[in-house]
Amino acid sequence: MADPKNSPAVQSMEIEQAEQRERAVKNDLDTGLEDSFPASDPVSATHSAVPAGRTDADEADRVRQQSTEEEFPLVDQALRSTGEGCHSERVNDSRDALGALRRDVDRMAGTATEVASGATSLAKSEARTFVKSIEDKIRERPIAAVAVVAALAFVFGATR
């Protein structure tokens, strides 16, 4: 009896399965390319099981605080033995300074918004005043205004 592994049906099936595996990898790369367009990152057909971030902000703050406190326990111990300040104290001081900087930035952003709003209001007011003065001059001398517009239209038409 003939070996079943050498039959044409088995060989055809193995070839077809290899082609399907190759197509699947190519489709994954194509999908990765389409999903990343127009990003500058290289295309990857791999997937990560690691979550991108925490959805609970309180828990994220707790984990961040815990990791900072336990980040350099040997450094803290060495600094205490030499009589210098504790690393965690410096981290807390840095956090306080960072919080103060954030408050200053928020206050400055509010001030910048107010200045921009005031500048916009001033520009609108100036534009209204300018339009009003032009309207007044047109009402005072309508024939002169028509003559100026006609001359401008002639020059514009002649240059086109």
Image (tube, rainbow, N blue to C red):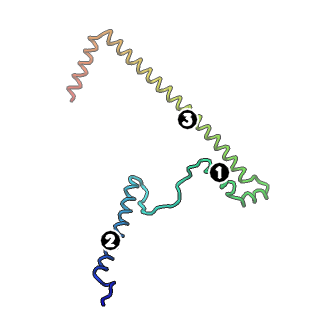
Sort mark 1 into few (<14), some (14-19) or many (20+) by Cα contacts within 10 Å.
few
The image quadrant that residue 80 belongs to is: bottom right
For the residue labelled by badge 2, is the local secondary structure a helix, a strand or a loop? helix
Q: What's the residue type where badge 2 is placed?
A: Glu
Percent from the top left, x then y, of residue 104?
61, 37
Mark 3 and mark 1 in contact (Cβ < 8 Å)? no
Q: Quadrant of the N terminus?
A: bottom left
- Mark earlier in primary sequence (2, 3): 2
- Residue 67 x %, y %: 65, 55
Q: Nearer the viewer, mark 1 or mark 3?
A: 1
Q: Which residue is mark 3?
A: 109
Which label belongs to residue 154? none
Q: Which three-letter amino acid code belongs to the residue tagged 3?
A: Ala
Displayed quadrant of residue 132 = top left
SS label for mark 1: helix
Task: Write down the quadrant of residue 8 in the picture.
Answer: bottom left
User: What amino acid type should be assigned to the residue bearing mark 1?
Assistant: Arg
- Gap in angstroms between the C-alphas marked 2 and 1: 51 Å
In terms of sequence position, does the residue under pointer 1 or pointer 3 come before the other? 1
Label 1: which residue? 62
Label 3 CA crowd tier, 10 Å (few <14, some 14–19, many 20+): few
Residue at horizontal 41 percent and vertical 53 percent from the top:
39
Q: Looking at the image, which residue sits at the far front?
A: 1
Q: CA distance from mark 1 to mark 3?
A: 28 Å
- Relative placement, left or right, of 104 versus 18 is right
Q: Identify the mark at residue 19; answer none if there is no mark.
A: 2
Mark 2 and mark 1 residues within 8 Å of each other at the beta carbon: no
Residue at image x 43%, y 57%?
Answer: 41
